[in-house]
Amino acid sequence: MIYTLLYGLDSVLLQPMKHIRNFCIIAHIDHGKSTLADRLLQTTGTISDREMQAQALDDMDLERERGITIKSHAIQMSYKHEGQDYILNLIDTPGHVDFSYEVSRSIAACEGALLIVDASQGIEAQTISNLYLALEHDLEIIPILNKMDLPGAMPEEVSDQITELIGCDIEDIIQASGKTGLGVDKILEAVVNRIPAPKGEESAPLQAMIFDSVFNPFRGIIAYYRVKNGVLKKGQKVRFLNTGRDYNADEIGILKMDLSPKNEVRAGDVGYIISGIKAANEVKVGDTITGSDNPCETAIKGFEDVKPMVFAGIYPVDTEDYEELRYSMEKLQLNDSSLVFEPESSAALGFGFRCGFLGMLHMEIIQERLEREFNMTVITTVPNVSYKAYMKKDPDEVLIVNNPSELPDPSGMDRIEEPYIKAQVITKTEYVGSIMTLCIEKRGELQNQVYLTQDRVEITFEMPLAEIVFDFYDRLKSVSRGYASFDYHPIGYKESDLVKMDLLLNGEQVDALSALVHRSNAFDLGKKICIKLRELIPRQQFEIPIQAAIGAKVIARETIKALRKDVTAKCYGGDITRKRKLLEKQKAGKKRMRQVGRVEVPQEAFLAVLKLND
């Protein structure tokens, strides 16, 4: 009551910490997280029926079109339970393996998690992966059986899988449906009763962890944070510990459907800060905010640093757009801190950037966002992973090779190592044979095979990361008719017999199409790429040889025939020497043209490698 009299509208914010709950939603892709989040927002009155739309928290057109969550989204809900007002801070997370970094950031800012499992599909690979991530942070897990309204729902079978996985009682599992709203009240009650309140001291020095940031063209960078200790007040001078810079908290507040300004944000709560920062490198996700006059002694240990899995070059179509592309990438990095990039140049494409992505879907999304949000048309080169090269001169010296063109001379190299992953595939028993064949073809080694139920099996493989970069995921879905789910995590580097395969067009090396491949796959892959490029590169006035080579040895060749003009059409009879003279003249002209002619490589050709089996 005193709070209400003193602060009026801020009374909801000033709930004691024991009445605050911070939780996230974790699940496999397409198990109904965003739909269930929509029902939670409607039930708590956070969003009116008039404003309601599907995937309310997903604010990108791309997310709605594909039906996936790409960014994690935070929102505050007010909920009355047994006559007491509670504040619930929800963070919706992505489900795809490529965005597990977003999930790790959300988990670091919460005390509990809703584990959602599709009642018609059961536990999938990413469910297990995200669950282990949550358990590492000691989060309270609330299991939820979603999509109970579907005719194909198997509640008993899937409940048994959940109890076996997390060791809970069958009564702890809440049956729900994001579409019909079944069980939403029980979920909210479970959040209040089972998830612990945040711990922290309001009297201690300010300590808040940034878990996300976005760029607003008018207001600069908006950082989202979770306050662990202390109180953040409007107008206060704050310091970002990682960068050591001081700023004024021009505007602070909480996250409703829109930003909701407040005079202070207290320990245990989730909020935002606007302090007029314009430069992208001044805000680092995982940084700690503290007061300038009374700073905290230690930074909060946040989540792990992002480790890019896949590397590719991104180049502007027009070289003049290089600076504009750099500006766009910096702005995009603010919104997606898992993107890393550095400048590089290519003989074929000019100046561009070598970018690190978390996976192939992440790479596709970044390219699409550059085109949609910044009107940048870009060329993406063949993706590859990072390798370690050890030299003969100094065995302790390790060269990290992110680009095939950086590979040192093989004669001076002692060995080369490539990253390996542990891959989990969960599928129906009828597809085990074809999935094993695919994994062995991709140089995978079978580690384990566990039957989860009579017709669901979990297969564990160790395989090189480079093999899943290309078309592995698409082919896995094809051979299993969409029933297989896939998840992986890195396990370190292993020595491999790798060679650099160059592609030559008209005798000129195209560095953007070079790749590091296993010696056993080199001939087969070289032949496939040459055939694919022959289809994609337009014919010229001269003959173009396409060659795949390892060092000086050509291992595959295809030829694009020349467009031939009929120069003898004007000869009506007469001596054969007249025709021969014209043909010889044409031949000499084509030879000269071939010496000076340059071959334009279309955008599709750079990604042809990804679709070799189409």
Image: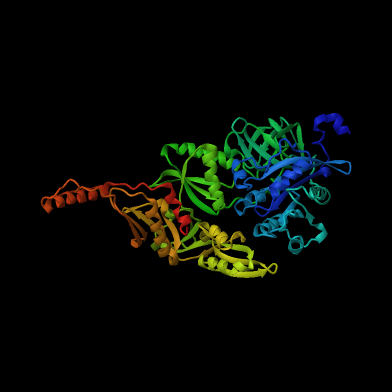
Say which quarter of the image contains residue 410. Answer: bottom left
Residue 504 percent coordinates (x, y): 35, 55
Q: Is residue 582 left or right of residue 177?
A: left
Residue 207 percent coordinates (x, y): 72, 42
Is residue 491 in sight in this rendering?
yes
Seen in the picture, residue 524 relative to 584 is either above or below; the reply is below
Q: Is residue 510 left or right of residue 72?
A: left
Residue 136 percent coordinates (x, y): 71, 56
Is residue 267 in sight in this rendering?
no
- Residue at 76 percent across and 60 percent down: it is 155
Q: How many marks?
A: 0
Q: Nearer the viewer, residue 328 or 396?
A: 328
Q: Nearer the viewer, residue 569 or 275?
A: 569
Seen in the picture, residue 426 relative to 50 is either above or below; the reply is below
Q: Nearer the viewer, residue 543 or 177?
A: 177
Q: Is residue 361 left or right of residue 548?
A: right
Say which quarter of the image contains residue 499. Answer: bottom left
Query: Tell me, what colour scheme is on the image?
Result: rainbow
Give the residue at the far left of this rendering: 575
Say which quarter of the image contains residue 7. Answer: top right
Residue 248 percent coordinates (x, y): 67, 31
- Locate the N terminus and report the quarter of the image it occupies: top right
Seen in the picture, residue 35 relative to 274 is either above or below; the reply is below
- Residue at 55 percent across and 50 percent down: it is 357
